[in-house]
């Protein structure tokens, strides 16, 4: 942390630190051709006063950006590594530039810390990949639902159109459909009457009177047929 009143004098690329970081990460000298991992090192010159003394710092860091292809699209990890701050009295920062670069190049991360850090980052990547896979699954399920709904609406519309055409055809021919409840068999009879009866000899009687019942009035055993209305 810098005291209040500190001033950022300049910000510039720091290629030497960038190469050090890429070597630490096991990366080639230049950015990957596929753009999956990018690094950029910068350093900022900061002027400030502390305990009545005029001081300057080089504050340097490397920004690592990793791109992971997952499901619907990539997700990004962006974090800073090799954060350093090197201090000198005001006016002496540039004179110590070579020394500072040697110091930075000699810094090595603690193996235990490196293992912990890499493991933690790997867990974050795994969690992110799992989250993306869950979102992909939800999106796919929603898309299937939409497709099924559209297909269902289309099928119902086609069925309605077929029923309408069938009803129109029956009107032209002057018939309607009846079902025998004892067998489930359907048949077409005149549409001039809404009530029909069938006996065991395959004989039909039709009437407009809803109270008419041929049983007891005519010989034979008569079953009432059910009119089948086409769905709209």
Image (spheres, rainbow, N blue to C red):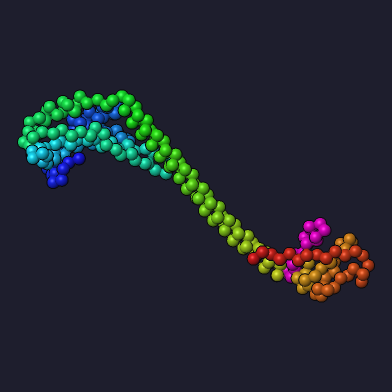
> Residue shown at 85%/64% (left/top)?
223
Would you identify the image quadrant in which residue 47 lies?
A: top left
**Which quadrant holds the C terminus?**
bottom right
**Which quadrant holds the N terminus?**
top left
Identity of the residue furthest to the front in this view? 51
Residue 57 shows in the view: yes
Q: Is residue 79 left or right of residue 72?
A: left
The x, y position of residue 199, in whole percent, is: 88, 63
Q: Is residue 73 above or below residue 213?
A: above
Q: Is residue 125 above or below residue 155?
A: above
Residue 35 shows in the view: no
Pick the residue in front: 56 or 187.
Answer: 56
> Residue shown at 25%/30% (left/top)?
21
Range of magenta residues: 173-186
Residue 72 part of the magenta-drawn span: no
Pick the residue in front: 116 or 218.
Answer: 116
Residue 181 part of the magenta-drawn span: yes
The x, y position of residue 165, in whole percent, is: 65, 65
Identity of the residue furthest to the left in this view? 91
> Residue shown at 47%/48% (left/top)?
139
Q: Is residue 105 left or right of residue 202?
A: left
Q: Is residue 31 left or right of residue 139?
A: left
Would you identify the image quadrant in which residue 87 lies?
A: top left
The x, y position of residue 133, in whole percent, is: 45, 41
> Residue shown at 15%/45% (left/top)?
4
Q: Report the label total.
A: 0
Pick the residue in front: 213 or 96.
Answer: 96
């Amino acid at each position: 942390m810098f005291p209040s009143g500190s001033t950022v004098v300049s910000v510039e690329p720091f290629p030497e630190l960038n190469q050090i970081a890429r070597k630490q990460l096991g990366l080639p000298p230049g950015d990957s051709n596929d753009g999956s991992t990018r690094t950029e090192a910068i350093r900022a010159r900061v002027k400030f006063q502390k305990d009545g003394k005029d001081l300057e710092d080089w504050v340097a860091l490397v920004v690592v950006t990793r791109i992971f292809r997952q499901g619907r699209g990539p997700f990004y990890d962006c974090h800073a590594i090799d954060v350093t701050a090197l201090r000198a009295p005001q006016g002496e920062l540039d004179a110590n530039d070579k020394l500072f670069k040697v110091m930075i190049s000699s810094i090595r991360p603690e193996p235990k810390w490196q293992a912990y850090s890499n493991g933690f980052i790997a867990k974050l990547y795994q969690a992110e990949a799992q989250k993306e896979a869950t979102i992909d699954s939800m999106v796919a399920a929603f898309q299937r639902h939409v497709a099924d709904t559209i297909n269902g609406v289309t099928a119902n519309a086609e069925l309605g159109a077929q029923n309408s055409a069938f009803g129109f055809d029956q009107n032209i021919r002057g018939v309607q459909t009846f079902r025998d409840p004892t067998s489930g068999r359907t048949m077409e009879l005149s549409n001039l009457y809404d009530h029909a009866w069938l006996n065991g000899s395959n004989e039909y009687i039709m009437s407009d009177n809803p109270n008419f019942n041929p049983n007891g009035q005519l010989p034979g055993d008569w079953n009432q047929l059910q009119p089948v209305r086409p769905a709209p």
